Image: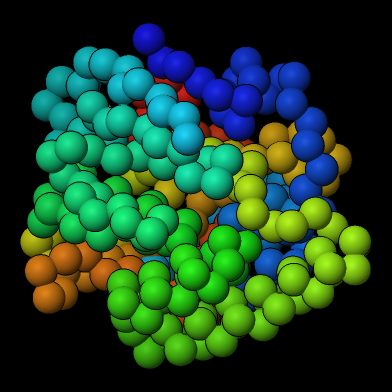
Amino acid sequence: MDHRTSTCWCRHCRARRRRPYVIAYLLLATAALLYVLAHPQPGHAQPHQTPAPATTRSPAPRQAPAAASPTAAAGQGLNWIGFHGMQLPVSPADGPHDTRDGLASGFTDTPQGALLAAINIGVRTAAQWGTAIFEPTITRQVTGPDATALLQADEAASAQIGAAAGAGLVPPAEQGYAAEVGYRFLAWSRSSAVVDVVSAGPAANGTTVLASTRIQVLWLRGDWRVVAPPGGNWASAATAITSLNGYTVFPGER
């Protein structure tokens, strides 16, 4: 049984949920998902050209397709846990094995470990969670020449969010209203992986839109690290898409 919460974005819940998404406009520089959800571009979903980067949902068994590759099967048998209103995938076997202080680390050097690291680390680089989450995540778990730019962009966005919330212009940006619904591996090895992660969430007009964000991870110092997106801007690694064709969908998301 796939137990879903009020923050779920399955096809049943999407039909009855219509939450404003004003916060997206404050995070354009740091969160590709929020950028794409606020600015959907139907009909212009092109493949990426360059690689970048407290409720539970019970795992939903799903029969793997015949001759499924290790990367295609990476989304099977997962648990889902609450993170600031979102549901993120975890695995007792493949990680994250350390979730103290709201962070996530300790992943296995496997396709499933790489997928879980890409999602759990990538989500935690968003400015909306506050400095206690995004600063240690970026400084400890993000690598690449644009890591500093990502941190600086988050700091600036966090200050803007705080000022807007303090002025009563928007509610405090502590909740996420998106769901991870699918993925596809572009590359995989024991030292590096590139995966497109598809998220679903509400646009400003109340419709549900899909965004695909490309995330590269590297195996460094005994764990996966996310490569910062070009220019430190996740919007450069994301695009709007109109269907899940070509992606492996997480169980229960069809």
Percent of width and height locating residue 122: 42, 61
Residue drawn at x 29%, y 40% is 90
Q: Residue furthest top?
A: 1
Residue 66 or 145: which is nearer the viewer? 145
Which quarter of the figure has residue 193? Answer: bottom left
Query: Residue at 25% of width from left, 60% of height from top?
Result: 105
Q: Is residue 101 left or right of residue 205?
A: left
Looking at the image, which is closer to me, 209 or 130? 130
Nearest to the observer: residue 139 or residue 180 = 139
Residue 18 is situated, as x and y percent measured from the top left of the image, at: 79, 31
Please identify the quarter of the rendering in which residue 184 is found: top left
Relative to 97, say whether 90 is above or below: above
The mark tally for this picture is 0
Q: Residue at x 46, y 76 (%)?
A: 135
Tell me residue 33's x, y (percent): 59, 56
Quarter of the rendering occupied by the N terminus? top left
Describe residue 109's horizontal placement relative to residue 99 as left or right: left
Location of residue 214 in the rendering, given as x and y in whole percent from the top left corner:
43, 60
Residue 125 appears anywhere in the view: no
In this view of the protein, can residue 116 be seen by the observer? yes
Q: Residue at x 63, y 48 (%)?
A: 175
